[in-house]
Amino acid sequence: MRRLAGATSLDYWNMAGPFGGITAATLLNAVLLQPDRLPVPLALTVSYCGAIREGGFDIAVRCLRGGRTTQHWAVELTQGPERDVMASALVVCVLRRETWGAREARPPEVEPAPAQFGSRLGMGPPWIQRYREHLVRGELFRGNPHSETVTWIADAPARPLDYPALAAICDAFFPRIFLRRPSFVPIATVSLNVYFHAGHQVMAEQSSTPVLAQASGQVFNEGFCDQEGRVWGQDDHLLATTHQMVWYKE
Amino acid sequence: MRRLAGATSLDYWNMAGPFGGITAATLLNAVLLQPDRLPVPLALTVSYCGAIREGGFDIAVRCLRGGRTTQHWAVELTQGPERDVMASALVVCVLRRETWGAREARPPEVEPAPAQFGSRLGMGPPWIQRYREHLVRGELFRGNPHSETVTWIADAPARPLDYPALAAICDAFFPRIFLRRPSFVPIATVSLNVYFHAGHQVMAEQSSTPVLAQASGQVFNEGFCDQEGRVWGQDDHLLATTHQMVWYKE
């Protein structure tokens, strides 16, 4: 068991705790900081157990099992004297190597990102201002018949894309139920899953260029809905696929 | 920490260990056996850390955090005197309740399942005989240009569908790379994710009727590929969505 310490940032604050994407990035980064980890993250699953309080937190990192090409980690973020578990994650790191390959998924056909674009909302919690976003398809709170959105998104201020930033972007989609319902409903991400499909070279090629993010929901049922997302980089590279389950109150 | 003990079953044996689906079902069931769990499983993620050896194993179940509507669990399957971690899982259980709902995803248009069908392969590891399967689309080892398969599948012998059985079916898809490559390549599931979209009533309505299972891969790259799957029940209910990352050698 390896222990790290950190603190929340008000820059990434959401409504009742940190933006879930920054928590995902923090948990992933706790593994990436380990000197004996395999070079490339492959999978990240986060259970959001409770609303993280403003201030300090502890992170425990445990290598469950290591192999030559695959390595499994468990990460827990705790707060307070009782070490209340606020978030728990499973992370897989791997060694990638040359093999036969193929891409089946294709990005949506959209115009290139505008040269300049800013934050999409003038108001809202602080984390929204940490992204520049240009919405291609989908509008919130219109009671749409489907929940698909397509959007160009980039970190603000600009920074080269890395795996923690990509993990955070995977939770930066607006909740799918905001696309379907005519007005705001309380929501909370319960579980987030990210698969990373790019090695270091493709990640480096992204630099700080906006990525194309596409998401939709399949089912809204009895207080919970899902979200499937894809994040596309330069040259139609699918950088990440992501899935989450969200609690909603309606 | 709560401890359970179990043993592998040769009936569900794969090539170098148990079928991953039975391991997923076993880990989920370890949570479902807890008397204080919330009634409905929502999410299950399994990290397959190592090949489980034939014989006994221990399972440790820990409630990370419980709320009124959401409850987070961690489960670990270990073997041997050193408690080697062979599989680790995060499970979310919830209380479902009446809310606004919608279904966006639609099942593929297919003929109804034949009244009678058997196991698809006459040979292969034992677990394959634990399913009856009728393939609608997709053929193995033909070097297809895409990896989609659609198949009717049911437990053999027949039993009413429950959440562990559904979790196992989510890993019963043939590896996507078998659809793309002309011949066998070694594979191993690294990480499996299952979201359950149905409450107890819809699950009970399924009885032992075959479910319709659809899967495809998005990316095959540098030794790892993904799989997205959907499992459809009676009346076009989407019972589960599932995602996994798979190591392959080529």
Image (spheres, coloured by chain):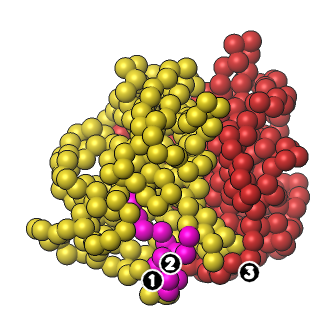
Chain colours: A yellow, B red
Is B222 placed left or right of B41 in the picture?
Answer: left
Q: What residue lies at 82% left-to-right and 29% top-to-bottom? A: B3
Per the image, label 3 sits on a secondary structure element best described as helix
Chain of residue at mark 1: A
Q: Secondary structure at mark 2?
A: loop
Sequence order check, earlier mark of 2 and 1: 1
Across and down, in percent, residue A227 comes to 51, 65
Q: Secondary structure at mark 1?
A: loop
Amino acid bearing label 2: Phe
Q: Which residue is mark 2?
A: A184
Q: Residue at x 80, y 40 (%)?
A: B30
The three-letter code of the residue at mark 1 reads Phe
Q: Position of residue B125 (x, y in %)?
A: 71, 39
Judge left or right: residue B29 versus residue A18: right
Q: Which residue in the protein does label 1 denote? A: A141
Q: Residues within 10 Å of mark 2 (few under 14, many from 20)?
A: few
The x and y percentages for residue B233 are 73, 71
Residues A28 and B15: in front is A28
Residue A182, magenta (yes or no): yes
